[in-house]
Image (cartoon, grey):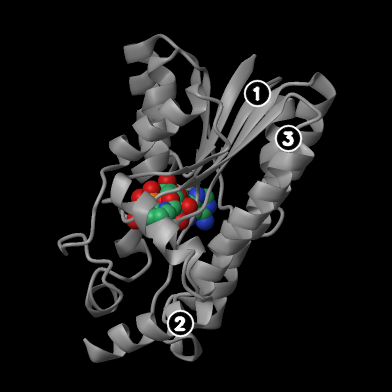
């Protein structure tokens, strides 16, 4: 059976993308840690949209999990025609003060698992000469953000990796796409420990005047861009303007401005 695999589908942007694909009658394979939430979602989607929705509860912040997920798709006889690497976590605060283990787990989740899943499923897509891979980076990939140093650097990796792969995959009929959301109202800040002082200083509060999108808006923009066979999308008009503006300034200047603003608050 053909499926679209979405990581980080138990909430936020991943869940919104899952609903949009389910509406379009894609069979789904949802991956995240929260088995109860995934089970409930699969049941709802199967009943509401008449699709086959199944899940794998897995912790992609652990090394070797991506390989287990791949093996499980084989065991279930699933053909992953679309891979959406959306699962990700953030962190905020002074790097040297943050605990090292969660930072390393974030790199495993945001980078290593994404690379491993892409490698394994891309091999199959190339053989079939069709498939789609969507990687979720962030507006944070355009700026080296002090006090969010590891996260923003992890998203630069995702952006560069995905844009390079887009070109490598052109000779095959594998469509690769990069999604860069801006501030979106999800559980992200809470999971990153950024819903208090750190989020306020980073200007990333959900209540601030910063342009804020809903996960549904991000998912809708993604589908529109996918229909147009785009390879790259920054969601939200204001975010698109900000990403173009950031390209006009040197990274060192942007980093200095962000550091000053964080320390002033
Ligand atoms: N929200 C924003 O403002 C924003 C802005 C730019 C980019 N993004 C990016 O958008 C993506 C989705 O984030 P979101 O805003 O939707 O955040 P979210 O609401 O916190 O959702 C994150 C998803 O990832 C899953 N996840 C977290 N840790 C995991 C792990 N170790 N293994 C497997 N799954 C894991 C979570 O499920 P479980 O807890 O069940 O595992 C959840 O389904 C991320 O890559 C994020 O960097 C978000």
Q: Which quarter shows the N terminus?
A: top right
Q: Up-down: is 132 above or below 165?
A: above
Is the C-beta separation of discs 1 and 3 under 8 Å? Answer: no
**Quarter holding residue 97:** bottom left
Q: Residues within 10 Å of mark 3 (few under 14, many from 20)?
A: some
Estimate the x, y position of residue 120 in percent, counting from the top left. Answer: 77, 39
Label 1 – label 2 distance at C-alpha: 42 Å
Instruction: Judge depth for marks 1 and 2 and give the one in front.
Output: 2
* Looking at the image, residue 256 lies above or below residue 126: below
Earlier in the chain: of badge 2 and badge 3, it is 3
- Residue, disc 1: 81
Q: Residues within 10 Å of mark 1 (few under 14, many from 20)?
A: many
For the point 51% across and 53% down, the residue is 137
Answer left or right for 15 relative to 169: left
Q: Mark 3 highlights which residue?
A: 121
Query: What's the distance in space between the residues labelled 1 and 3, CA to CA?
Result: 9 Å
The residue drawn where x is 58% and y is 37% is 231
Q: Tell me the element at label 1.
A: strand
Residue 109 position by quadrant? bottom right
Mark number displayed over residue 253? 2
| Image: 81 above or below 11 | above
Write the residue at 38% across / 50% down: 240
Tell me what residue is drawn at x 40 percent, y 9 percent: 50
């Amino acid at each position: 059976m053909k499926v679209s695999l979405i990581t980080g589908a138990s909430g936020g942007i991943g869940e919104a993308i899952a609903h949009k694909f389910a509406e379009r009658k894609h069979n789904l394979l949802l991956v995240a840690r929260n088995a109860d939430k995934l089970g409930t979602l699969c049941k709802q989607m199967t009943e509401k949209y008449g699709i086959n929705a199944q899940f794998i509860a897995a912790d992609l912040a652990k090394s070797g999990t991506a390989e287990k997920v791949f093996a499980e798709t084989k065991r279930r006889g699933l053909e992953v025609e679309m891979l959406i690497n959306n699962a990700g976590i953030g962190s905020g605060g002074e790097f040297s003060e943050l605990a090292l283990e969660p930072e390393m787990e974030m790199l495993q989740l945001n980078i290593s698992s994404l690379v491993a899943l892409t490698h394994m499923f891309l091999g199959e897509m190339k053989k079939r000469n069709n498939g789609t891979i969507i990687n979720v980076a962030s507006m944070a990939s355009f700026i080296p953000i002090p006090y969010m140093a590891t996260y923003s650097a992890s998203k630069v990796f995702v952006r560069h990796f995905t844009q390079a792969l887009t070109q490598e995959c052109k000779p095959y009929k594998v469509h690769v796409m990069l999604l860069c959301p801006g501030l979106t109202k999800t559980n992200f800040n809470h999971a990153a420990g950024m819903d208090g002082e750190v989020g306020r200083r980073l200007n990333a509060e959900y209540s601030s005047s910063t342009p804020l999108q809903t996960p549904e808006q991000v998912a809708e923009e993604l589908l529109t861009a996918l229909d147009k066979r785009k390879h790259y999308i920054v969601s939200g008009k204001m975010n698109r303007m900000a990403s173009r503006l950031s390209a006009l300034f040197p990274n060192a200047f942007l980093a200095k401005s962000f550091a000053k603003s964080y320390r002033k608050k």
